[in-house]
Every structure is written in C-alpha cells, then in structure tokens.
Amino acid sequence: MDIFFFEVFNCKADAKGRVMLPVALRNQVTPILKDGFYIKKSYYADCLELYPAHEWERVMAELNEKSRFDEENIDFIRMYTAGLRRVEVDGTGRLLIPKDLVNMAGIAKEVTIAPIGKRLEIWDKAKYDKKIMAPKDEKKKLAKQVMSEAKPKDNVS
C-alpha cells in the first residue's frame, strides 16, 4: 500500500532514543504498522530517513538492478545503506531509534519529523529549522531549478 505522508510534526526524544509519534502521524501509518519500517542515515542531509518496509524493498529492488561488477555502484550502495536498521513502532506509539543513528544525525531532545513523499525524515529540530529557513532568493532559485525540469510524459505527479 502506497502512503504519501503529510504534515510536519515536532516531538521529543528520550534518553533511549524513543520518539512518541503524534496521534495524527500514527493515524497515517496505521495501515502499514504491521509491516514495520527501515531507518537509515540520510545520504545527503544531517537527518534520518524512515521508510515503510514495502517502500524500502522497492528502493532495494531498484538498487539490485545495478551492476555488481561496477565499483562505483557498490560504493554508492554501501554508503547509501550505511547504518540501515529495521525498526517498529511499539504498542504505545513509540519509535525506538538506535542510539548510533541518533548520534550520527546529531539528534538531541527536540525532534522534527517531516514528510518527503513516501518516506519521513527525522531531524534534530534546530537543524531542520535552519535547513528550511533559506533566504527568499535562494528559495526562488531552487524552486525554479527543480520545478522547471521536464518530467516524463507518463508522470502525472
């Protein structure tokens, strides 16, 4: 089942790396809770990425299509999947983030969970706030660059 996440959530992480998911987010993940999730360090940003299991399996299927005899492919896959863990949301709605991943992403007590299509990013709140507070000119330039790219004809998004 494909789920496109929405809404940004501010939460708190405890000393063990547990984050209580807000009710609105739990409602979004309810249909896929039994399948679990995968979490990893983002390849580009100082945050973590949380994938529903079926979405991560789709990503891995795509990566497995790459030649295993190309050293660049192997290096990329190795770096892209570094720190990957399978995680679940417990019965009380808490997500336990492994301590090494909490440290990798520099997550303190205040956490922001932000949607990126079919996955969620988990940020230290201060880092997230800084990341999205780009100057207006920078935002305009980025929007023009990204939104001006041609999409394949069969892409209706």
Image (tube, helix red, strand yellow):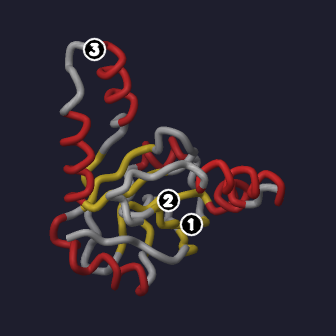
Q: Is residue 41 left or right of residue 65?
A: right
Residue drawn at point x = 18 percent, y = 42 percent: 61
Tell me whether circle 1 and circle 2 mark residues in contact (CB < 8 Å).
yes
Residue drawn at point x = 32 percent, y = 42 percent: 84
Q: Earlier in the sequence, mark 2 or mark 3?
A: 3
Distance (Cα) linking label 1 and label 3: 37 Å
Name the element at disc 2. strand
Which quadrant of the figure has residue 20? Answer: bottom left
Residue 86, x across and y down, in percent: 25, 52
Distance (Cα) linking label 2 and label 3: 32 Å
- For the residue pair 119 and 70, the one nearer the viewer reads as 70
* Residue denoted by label 1: 112
Name the element at disc 1. strand
Residue drawn at point x = 59 percent, y = 56 percent: 147
The three-letter amino acid code for the residue at tag 3 is Asp
* Residue denoted by label 2: 122
Quadrant assignment for the N terminus:
bottom left
Residue drawn at point x = 65 percent, y = 48 percent: 145
Does residue 36 lie above or below 151 as drawn?
A: below
Q: Earlier in the sequence, mark 1 or mark 3?
A: 3
Q: Residues within 10 Å of mark 1 (few under 14, many from 20)?
A: many
Q: Is residue 92 left or right of residue 43?
A: left
Does residue 103 lie above or below 18 as drawn?
A: above
Q: Earlier in the sequence, mark 1 or mark 2?
A: 1
Q: Is residue 134 left or right of residue 142?
A: right
The three-letter amino acid code for the residue at tag 2 is Ile
Residue 46, x across and y down, in percent: 57, 45
Q: Is residue 53 left or right of residue 151?
A: left
Task: Identify the mark at residue 70; answer none if there is no mark.
Answer: 3
